[in-house]
Every structure is written in structure tokens, then in C-alpha cells.
Amino acid sequence: MKTDLKMPIIGFMHSPYREKFGIPRQPNLVQVESYVEMQAPYNDALAFEGIEAFSHLWLIWQFHDNKNQIEDQQTASTQQNNKFRAQVRPPRLGGNQKIGVFATRSMYRPAPIGLSVVQFKQVKKVGKSLRIYVTGADLLHGTPILDIKPYIQYSDAVPHAQSGYAQDEPIRKTVLWMETAEIQKAELLSLGLLQPQIVQELEQVLALDPRPAYQDDPERIYNMRFADFDVSFKVDLNCVYICKIVLLHTD
């Protein structure tokens, strides 16, 4: 039986999520726009003929930034057996309760593969680049894309499905800008360095409270990189307070 499977990378995700901290834990919780930049020879527009008839797509991708990421695909089977985690601690359960890895969407899996359904926007040619624009992706910037498939409503949607400990959407908190951050935001907007769309997307991300579930100190200041900005915030029971937003050097 053949056990070594090599999969091509057809493209890379370009998104405002520049670090794992802050990425929504499921797709479509935040309507952030991003795009897949296709790689040759898969950047052929003919390969996407007819895709405009579908409202949503499946993205199949690779968890590429794990600390225990398997580097050598030729010895993947041996390494996976040595590093296999039968149980993990899902953030949704507070990070304290263990559950079987195959009952979760944890990134620490035998095969580091993810699956996300996203809303399709358009196929766009930008110079020599072919881009597939989507909204709702939960992928880190630079994520390798292994495949793109259309979402089929009648078979992929299961209205009465049971989702265990993740049956309900996470509660969203109110996002407030503190005085210093409000001044910084206004200045960046006036200079054209910050776009209103980025502000809206950032607020959606923070409303989900990206902190680890076991951290609940309302005075602790957290830092998160979103798009080209470093954002500081703190969280209490009901609100997320943006303390500072600073444009990072992107050269």
C-alpha cells in the first residue's frame, strides 16, 4: 500500500492575519477580505471558468506555521507516529479539558491539513498574477493552498447537524476605542494610511475576544498584528478596549 503522498501547492493566501493570535477559530465569523494568489501552472484563468456560478468555495490548505511542523515529507509517516497527539485541549473548552484530536479542528493533527468554506467574490488578473478573492477566510497570511473546490449547497449544508461542544456561535463583545487609540485612528484615516474597511474588519476580529480562554485579567494589555498595524487592547466581561494602533514599517 502506498503511504507517501505529496501534494502540490497551487497558491498562497494573502490576508490581514499576520500572526496566529487573533485569527478567528472558525471561518465566516469575520467578513475579512483576502485572496489566494495562484502559482504557475495553476494560474490559468481557464481553470476557473464557471466558478462565478458558485457563491462559496472550499479551501483546502496546510497548517504551515506549527512549532512541530513536519519539514521532510518523505519521512512524514515515521515522524507523525512519533509526534502523534491522541488528545488536545480545544480553546472552546477553556484550554483545560482534553478531547480526542479527531473530535476537534486542532492544528496539531497527523496530517497538517485545514478545510475552510469561504464566500467567493471574484477572479482577478493583476499584472501577471491571478487572484481568487474571498471573504470569511480564517487563514494566516502566507498559508499554502492545496486545492479549491466549489461548495455544493444541497449536499454540503446539513441544517440539523449536531456540533458537540461547538454548537453555538461564540458571543461577541462590544469594541470601544480608548481616547489615545481614537486619536491615532483618526490621524491614520486622514492620511490615507488606514482604510475604513480595515477598521471594520479589526473590530469584528476583536469582538470575538482572541485571548486564550484561560486568561481573564481585565487589566492585561495584549498586542496583535493585523494587516500593517500593531494593535494593543484589553478585555473585560463585556467589552474589548482598543488602547493603541500603530502603523508598522512594511518595507
Image (cartoon, rainbow, N blue to C red):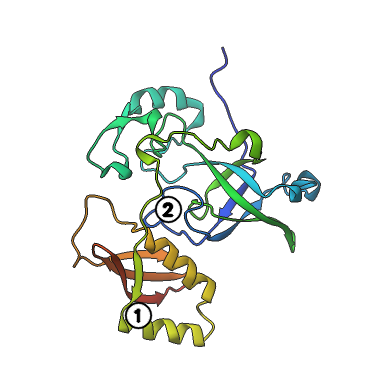
Above-or-below relation of 200 to 13:
below
Q: What residue type is labelled 1?
A: Ala
Which mark is first along the chain, 2 or 1? 2
Q: What residue type is labelled 2?
A: Pro
Residue 208 horizontal side relative to residue 111, left or right: left
Numbered badge on residue 131: none
Q: Can residue 34 be seen in this view?
A: yes
Q: Is mark 1 on a helix, strand or loop?
A: helix
Gap between marks 1 and 2 measured at Cα: 23 Å
Q: Is mark 2 on a helix, strand or loop?
A: loop
Residue that numbered label 2 is attached to: 24
Q: Is residue 227 visible?
A: no
Residue 238 horizontal side relative to residue 225, left or right: left
Which residue is rendered at x = 54% and y = 41% of the image?
Answer: 61
Which quarter shows the N terminus? Answer: top right
Q: Which of 68 and 140 is in front in this view?
A: 140
Which residue is rendered at x = 54% and y = 54% of the image?
Answer: 136
Residue 88: quarter of image: top left
Image coords of residue 130 (percent x, y)? 71, 55
Residue 250 horizontal side relative to residue 49, left or right: left
Above-or-below relation of 27 to 236:
above
Badge 1: how crowded within 10 Å, few (<14), some, or many (20+)?
A: many
Badge 2: how crowded within 10 Å, few (<14), some, or many (20+)?
A: many
Q: How many labels does the image show?
A: 2
Residue that numbered label 1 is attached to: 181
Image coords of residue 193 (percent x, y)? 51, 80
Image coords of residue 92 (percent x, y)? 32, 44
Image coords of residue 139 (percent x, y)? 50, 51
Residue 239 horizontal side relative to residue 34, left or right: left
Which residue is rendered at x = 49% and y = 49% of the image?
Answer: 27
Which residue is rendered at x = 42% and y = 29% of the image?
Answer: 110
